[in-house]
Image: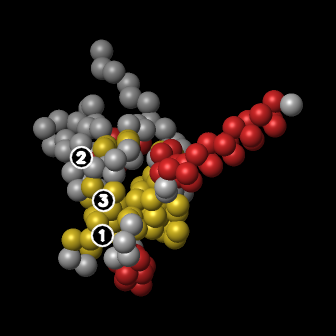
Amino acid sequence: MAKKLEVKKDVSVRNKKAKFEYHLIDKYTAGIVLKGSEIKGIRTGKVSLVDSFCLFIGDELWIRNLHISPYEMGSFYNHEAKADRKLLLNKRELRKLEAGSKDTGVTIIPYHLFINDRGFAKVQIALAKGKKIYDKRQDIKEKDLKREMSYR
C-alpha cells in the first residue's frame, strides 16, 4: 500500500533567527525559479531557510543554501536539496538591492517563504545589517518584559 503524503494549502516558513541576528532595512517579495518536484517539496512543508542567503551572480540574484527536501514520491528526476535557485525581481529592485548590498556589513537574507493565492512559491527577502551583541541583549530583554507583562 502506497503512503499518502499530506499536502498543505497554506505553506508559510519563517527564518526565526533572521530578525534576531539582523536589522531588516528594506523588504522585497521575489518569485523563485523552481524545477519539477521542488514545488511539491515546498507544498509538503519540508523547507528550511536556516543558513540561506542571497548573492548576485552577474546581474541576477540567486538564493543559496535554501533546503527543499526531495519529493518522496518522485523518481530519479528528483531535485537536489540545496541547489542554487534564481530569484525573480524587477530591474529597479535588483539595482536597489545591488547598490545597498555593496555597503559594508549589509547582506541580503531570505526570511519568509510562502505560497501565494495563485499557487506560486514566493520568498520575502530583506536588505539586512548584522546586529551587535548589545542589540541582541536588548531584544531579549524586551521579549522577556513583554512575556512577563502578559502573565500579569
**Front residue of this view, candidates 91 and 7:** 91
Q: Name the image quarter holding residue 109.
A: bottom left
In the rendered structure, find residue 93 and report the number of the disc placed on it: none
| Residue 100 in view of the camera | yes
Q: Disc 2 and disc 1: Cα gap in Å? A: 16 Å
Report whether 41 appears left or right of 111.
left
Which residue is located at x 19 percent, y 44 percent? Answer: 80
Q: Residue furthest front?
A: 134
**Front residue of this view, candidates 69 and 58:** 58
At label 1, the amino acid type is Leu
Marks 1 and 3 close (CB-CB < 8 Å): yes
How many marks the image carries: the answer is: 3
Q: Disc 1 and disc 3: Cα gap in Å? A: 7 Å
Marks 3 and 2 close (CB-CB < 8 Å): no
Q: Name the image quarter holding residue 75.
A: top left
At label 3, the amino acid type is Ile
Residue 47 at x, y percent in the picture: 38, 41
Mark 3 / mark 2, whichever is N-terminal? 3
Question: Relative to 86, does residue 137 appear above or below in the rendering?
Answer: above
Q: Quadrant of the N terminus?
A: top left
* Local secondary structure at mark 2: loop
Q: Which residue was labeled with disc 2?
A: 82
In the rendered structure, find residue 61 and report the number of the disc placed on it: 1
At label 2, the amino acid type is Lys
Residue 36 at x, y percent in the picture: 25, 50
Q: Residue furthest left?
A: 76
Q: Disc 3 and disc 2: Cα gap in Å? A: 10 Å
Q: Which residue was labeled with disc 3?
A: 63
* Local secondary structure at mark 3: strand
Residue 59 at x, y percent in the picture: 25, 78
Which residue is located at x 48 percent, y 68 percent? Answer: 28
Question: Relative to 94, does residue 126 appear above or below in the rendering?
Answer: above
